[in-house]
Amino acid sequence: MKLYIQQKVFSWVDRFTVMDEAGRDKYYVEGELFSFGKKLHLYDMAGAERAFIQQKVFSFLPRYFVFVEGMEIAEIVKELTFLRPRYSIEGLGWEINGSFWAHDYEIVQGSRPIVTIHKEWMTWGDCYEMDIADERDEIVALSVVLAIDCVMAAEAAANS
């Protein structure tokens, strides 16, 4: 199953949609404008919250928590490295491999693929293609990818 994330280039608040393979809106993501730390809510098109992502403030390295149905299910941590970015996903037994600079990476559990992420470069705004192996992992995989994107966006903003 494939999902596509299209983020808006000029937006004061994070708000973007997640589309299915047919180009139909499946979810929308909305950030909180006046919050302490980054917070994103993932909603289905009926308006029900499916996941919540929250940045841990006052942390030496970037950390994001993923909540599904009110329960914390994962913590995404950027590890201290000097050559290339590395992230760990605590709580799920998932690992991340690939190139974050090129936005081309995958998340696996042992040898089982969870999701493959690929960035479309010639688009207006950021557009990501997610190929999710098992639809039961859809919400969690989407939330983890959004948390990783938050870390990368914050680093890009700090470096510019």
Image (cartoon, rainbow, N blue to C red):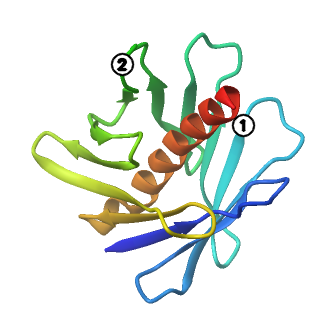
Residue 155 falls in which quadrant of the image? Answer: top right
Compared with 55, 128 (above or below) is below
Quarter of the image with the N terminus is: bottom left
- Mark 2 or mark 1: name the one nearer the start of the chain: 1
Residue at 9% in and 45% down: 111
Q: Are marks 2 and 1 in contact (CB under 8 Å)?
A: no
- Which element type, helix, strand or loop, lies under badge 2? loop
Query: Marks 2 and 1: which is nearer the front?
Result: 2
Residue 29 falls in which quadrant of the image? Answer: bottom right
Q: Position of residue 67 (x, y in %)?
A: 56, 43
Q: Amino acid at mark 2?
A: Leu
Circle 1 Cα neighbour tier, 10 Å, few/some/many (<14 / 14–19 / ≥20)? many
- Which element type, helix, strand or loop, lies under badge 1? loop
Q: How many marks?
A: 2
Q: Position of residue 28 (x, y in %)?
A: 65, 68
Circle 2 Cα neighbour tier, 10 Å, few/some/many (<14 / 14–19 / ≥20)? few
Question: Which of these two is toward me, 71 or 104?
Answer: 104
Question: Which of these two is toward me, 157 or 71?
Answer: 157
Query: Residue farthest to the left?
Result: 111
Please name the residue that numbered disc 1 is placed on.
38
Q: Position of residue 149 (x, y in %)?
A: 53, 44
Quarter of the image with the C terminus is: top right
Please name the residue that numbered disc 2 is placed on.
83
Q: Position of residue 41 (x, y in %)?
A: 68, 53
Compared with 93, 27 (above or below) is below
Q: CA distance from mark 2 to mark 1?
A: 26 Å
Q: Amino acid at mark 1?
A: Lys
Question: Which of these two is toward me, 58 or 50?
Answer: 58
Residue at 56% in and 33% down: 65
